[in-house]
Amino acid sequence: MKLSVVIPSYKDPHSVPTIKSLLENSELGEALEIIVVQDGYWMPNEWLIQDPRVRYIHVGKNSGMRESINTGVRASSGEFFMRLDEHCSFGKGYDKILTDSCKPNQIMTARRYALDPIKWEVMEEVGYIDYERLGIQDCGNEGRKFSGQKWNSRTKERKDIMVDETQAMQGSMWIMPRAWWDKHIGELQTKGYGPAYQDSVEVSMKTWKNGGKLMVNKNTWFAHKHRTFSRTHQEGTPQNPWIRSKSWAYALEQWEDYYNNELKEQWKKDFKI
């Protein structure tokens, strides 16, 4: 098995076209497996896609996105695994392109478009994102959080470099070698972070801390449901702004000193900023 795609799922009908997009645009054939973790609910029969590459795991108790990802990874057998939201579409050959280019010490994402999940179309008018710069955002009464911001200058300056290093990514899709996960991540931590937030921060920080890199691959793309459309997975966990702000605060407690005192100094050399 080359690639295991792990999808934490909660009552989102868009999981159906997401799985179809993964299957229809795959070039790995039987070396692809898709693991859908049903987080505390039974997926309706009409949603089930009958394909030997698709497996469904039902978790009896709703435990949230992070633990659903952990469950899927534990059940996976791929040399690489992808963490994926259940409302995404993909470019042709995404799986082969990403697994062929992702090095042993890397996390990788792809060029990201916005998806209209009703029409199931890329929202071309919104454009795409290649590079994001990591910063700390002030969110008013909810506190502060690590956040990626669109990095237009790097996008323009390095438009012809198709696989390149970046500083941040949306948590909706990333891929890494399973060996790197086993050695340096192990599982997504729910204590402190809570059930649903900051997973991309956790895996990126642990990767950088151990000498790895976060990469963007512009040779392929995915489209993630645009923020103007409603969310689903978080409705299945006891989410509220207090829990969200606690997750943000915990991530800063764990990583802000490292970010300010080590990462930013290293990035002055790596990114020449």
Image (tube, helix red, strand yellow):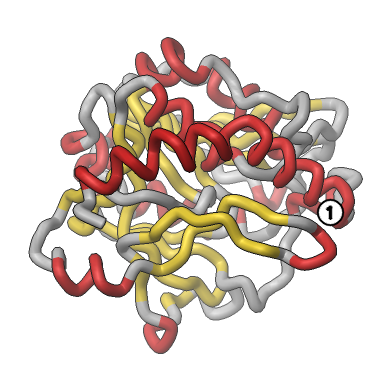
Residue in view at x 57 percent, y 34 percent:
255
209 w.r.t. 142: above or below: above
180 w.r.t. 83: above or below: above
183 w.r.t. 115: above or below: above
Q: Quadrant of the N terminus?
A: top left
Say if residue 213 shows up in the picture.
Answer: yes
Residue in view at x 39 percent, y 60 percent:
132
Q: Residues within 10 Å of mark 1 (few under 14, many from 20)?
A: few
Q: Secondary structure at mark 1?
A: helix
Residue in view at x 59 percent, y 26 percent:
72
Q: Give the quadrant of residue 215.
A: top left
Q: Give the quadrant of residue 218.
A: bottom left
Residue topped by disc 1: 235
Residue in view at x 87 percent, y 28 percent:
61
Spot the residue most to the bottom.
125
Is residue 162 left or right of 185 when viewed as pictured?
Answer: left
Q: Number of callouts in the render?
A: 1
